Image (cartoon, helix red, strand yellow):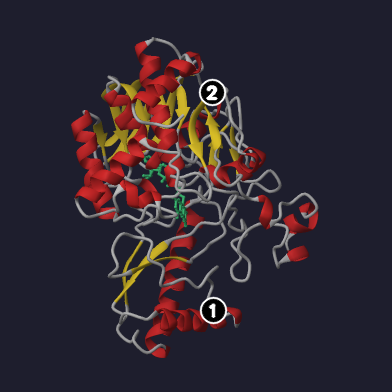
Amino acid sequence: MLTITEPERQIPVVAQADVVVCGAGPGGFAAAVSAARRGARTLLIERHGFMGGLATAGLIAPILGHTAHESCVPIVQGILREITERMHAIGGAPSWAQALNEWGIRFDAEALKIVLDEMMQQAGVEVMLHTLVSDVVRQNQHIQAILVETKSGRQAVQGKVFIDATGDADVAYRAGAPITHGRAFDGRGEAMGSFFHLAGFAPLSEEQAHAVLQQVEHEMEDGRFHFYNARFLARNTHHDDHAAANMTRFGGDADLAQDLTRAEFSTRRDVWDLVRYLRANVPGFEDCYVQQTSPQVGPRETRQIVGPYALTGDDIHEGSKFEDAIARGSWWIDIHCPLGRTYPVHLCTAECPQGADCAYWASHHDQMRGRAELYPPPGDWYDIPYRSLLSVSVPNLLAAGRCISATHEGMAGARVMGTCIAIGQAAGTAAALAVQQSCAPGEVDVETLRRMLREDGQLV
Ligand SMILES: Cc1cc2nc3c(=O)[nH]c(=O)nc-3n(C[C@H](O)[C@H](O)[C@H](O)COP(=O)(O)OP(=O)(O)OC[C@H]3O[C@@H](n4cnc5c(N)ncnc54)[C@H](O)[C@@H]3O)c2cc1C
C-alpha cells in the first residue's frame, strides 16, 4: 500500500475535563448532561454543527423504546422525559402523557436541536461542535487524551473518563480495544437507511391514502423502486404539514467513507425516483417536493465495544433482568436485511422470502428466529446491564448508545433512541461517580449508581 510519513508534530492540548463525551447523539447528549449535573467537569465533542445524532442529522423519528412492550407503562424517564417535556413546551413534541399512549414519541428535529443547546449550556457542559474525534493517545491501558481535527488543525483533549458515544465505537477502535462488527457470520451489520420529508401534496382521505400506497406498492412489486416499504405518507414527526418517510435502504459498511458515499447517492436517487413518479402519476401530487433529506445517511449497526457482558437476542425475547441493570429496553429484534435487499425482503428472519438465495439464510435458517420470536413478553422489558457499557481492556472507557457490548441480535433491539438515551444517562452518571470516587468506571458501586439514576427520575 502507498503510504506517507508524517513528520512528528506537537499537538496543543486545548481542553481538559473530568469526563469527555465523544459524540452528541442520544447516547452522548444524555451522558454529557448527566455527568455535568452530577458535578463532573464535562466536555462534549461532536463533528456536526448541532447535537442530536441521528435524531437530528438522520431525521430519525419517532423515539422508540419509551414504554414496555405493547403497553403504555413507561420504562424510560429521566432525560428522555425531560427532553420530551421541553420540546412539548415549544410545540415540538406531544406531552409526556400523550407520548405514553403512542408507539413512539413524534418530535420536531429543530426543536430537539435548540432544547439540547439550552440543556448543555444550563448544565455547564463545554461543547465542541465541528470537531471530529480522529485518534486516541493511550498510556498503558488507559486513554490519556483524544485527538481531534478542527478548522484550527489537530488538537488534543485530556480527560479522566472517556465516553464513546460515536455510535461507531470510534474511540474504542482508535484505542485498540477489542470491538465487534456486525453479525458473526460475515461481519455485516444491519442495512443503512435515511429519512426524507415530503410536502406540497393535497390532504388525502384515508381511502385515498390507502389507494395511493397500494399503487406505489404495486410498482415496488414490479421492481420500479428500491424501497423496503411503501409508507411514503408516514407521519413520524410532530407536524402534519409534511410526511416523514423511512423507506430507503442500502447494504454496506457504514465505517467506510466509500460505502457511505454510495449510500448517500443511492438513497437520494431512490427518493427522487419516487417524487418524479408521484408528480407524473398521482393526482394531487403534481407539485409535491422533497422538503428535506437527512443531512446524513443513517447507520444502524457498525462497530461495538466488547464488554464483560454482551446483551443477546435471548435477553430481549425473554425479558432478562440483571442485578446491575442501569436501563430498560423494549424494542424487539428488528434486523434490517444486512445485504440491503429491498421489497419484498424486509427483516432477517426465518421467513425471509429470499430463502436460499441468501448465503446467511442457506447456512443458518434452522437456527434463525421466526417473526413470532422477535419480541419481549407483552407488558415487559429487558434490562441493560452496566457490564455492557464497560470495555474489557480500557479501564477509563465507557460506551453509550448503539456501540455498547451486544450481539447482532441484542443490538437490533437496544439501538432505538429511547434506550440509547437511558443508556447515556447511566454512562454519564457512572462516569461522574467514578471521578468523584477516584476509581475506574468498572469499580463503581453499582447499587449507588442505580440509586443515583432513580433519584434523577430513571426507572431501574
Ligand atoms: C434508517 C434508520 C431508522 C431508524 N429508525 C428509528 C426509529 O424510528 N426510532 C428510534 O428510536 N430509533 C431508530 N433508529 C435507530 C437510532 O436512530 C440510532 O440507533 C440511535 O440514534 C443511536 O444513538 P447513538 O447516540 O448511539 O448514535 P448516533 O445517533 O449515531 O449519534 C452518534 C453521534 O456521534 C457523532 N460522531 C460520530 N463519530 C464521531 C467522531 N469521530 N467525532 C465526533 N463526533 C462523532 C455523530 O455525528 C452523532 O452525532 C433508526 C436508525 C436508522 C439508521
- Using the image as rendered, state which of residue 152 and residue 347 is in the foreground: 347
Side (left or right) of 379 relative to 48: right
- Using the image as rendered, state which of residue 40 and residue 100 is in the foreground: 100
- Which residue is rendered at x = 29% and y = 56% of the image? 108
Q: Residue 429 location in percent, x, y?
A: 38, 24
Query: Residue 106's quadrant in the figure?
Result: bottom left
Q: Identify residue for label 2.
A: 324
Q: Identify residue for label 1.
A: 217
What residue type is disc 1 on?
Glu
- Say if disc 1 is inside 8 Å of ligand 1: no
First along the sequence among labels 2 and 1: 1
Q: Residue 311 location in percent, x, y?
A: 60, 35
For the residue labelled by badge 1, is the local secondary structure a helix, a strand or a loop? helix
Side (left or right) of 133 relative to 369: left
305 shown above or below 357: above
276 shown above or below 255: below
- Which residue is rendered at x = 47% and y = 17% of the image? 447
Answer yes or no: is residue 12 visible: no
